[in-house]
Amino acid sequence: MAIDKVEIIDLIGIDNQTGNVILTISDHLDWKDESSHLLLLQDKLNSYLRFIESGEIYDSYPDAKHRKIVIQIVKKYSLTPRGEEFIRSVKKVIRDAGFDLISTYLEKQ
C-alpha cells in the first residue's frame, strides 16, 4: 500500500517491545510537488484518525483493544522544511486526540 491510497490502512500490527498498536503509513513519494504531497499526507492521516476514532480499528483488528495506538509514517525521502513544520503541528493534534505520531525513514538495504 502507499500514501496515495488514501482510504486504505497500509499496515497494522503490534510492536513486540512496547505492546503498542502501530498503524503505518508508507510514504514513497518525493517532495517535488510539495503541496500535493502535503495534501495527500493530510488526507491519509485524517483517514487513519477516522479509522481509529470510529472504532473500526477494533472491528478490523481486535488485538488493538486496550493498547496505546501509534501512527507511524515511514518515509522514503527527506521532508522539506514545510513538511517538517506540518509533521510537528500534526503531532500535537494527534497527541491531543489521545494517540501518538512518529515519523521515520525507510532503512536502505
Image: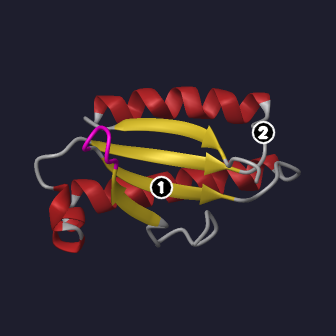
Q: Is residue 101 left or right of residue 73?
A: left
Residue 60 in the figure: left or right of residue 90: left
Choose between 109 and 3: the one closer to the eye: 109
Q: Quarter-wise, where is residue 92 in the image?
A: top left
Say whether residue 18 is magenta: yes
Q: Residue at point 40% right, 32% down?
A: 93
Q: Secondary structure at mark 1?
A: strand
Location of the N terminus (image quadrant): bottom right
Q: Amino acid at mark 1?
A: Thr
Label 1 crowd (10 A; few <14 / some 14-19 / many >=20): many
As drawn, the label of residue 5 is: none
Residue 28 position within the rendered picture, expressed as x and y whole percent measured from the top left: 72, 59
- Residues packed near mark 2 inside 10 Å, few (<14), some (14 to 19) or many (20 plus): few
Snapshot quadrant of residue 82: top right
**Nearest the camera: 54 or 99?**
99
Q: Position of residue 29 (x, y in %)?
A: 76, 58
Task: Specify the quadrant that holds the C terminus.
Answer: bottom right
Please state if 5 lies on the left or on the right of 14 as rendered: right
Q: Measured along the vertical axis of the image, is residue 57 above or below residue 86?
A: below
Residue beneath disc 2: 78
Q: Secondary structure of the magenta portion, mostly?
A: loop
Residue 6, x across and y down, in percent: 54, 68
Q: Quadrant of residue 63?
A: bottom left
Residue 39 coordinates in the image, percent (x, y): 64, 53
Q: Which residue is mark 1?
A: 24
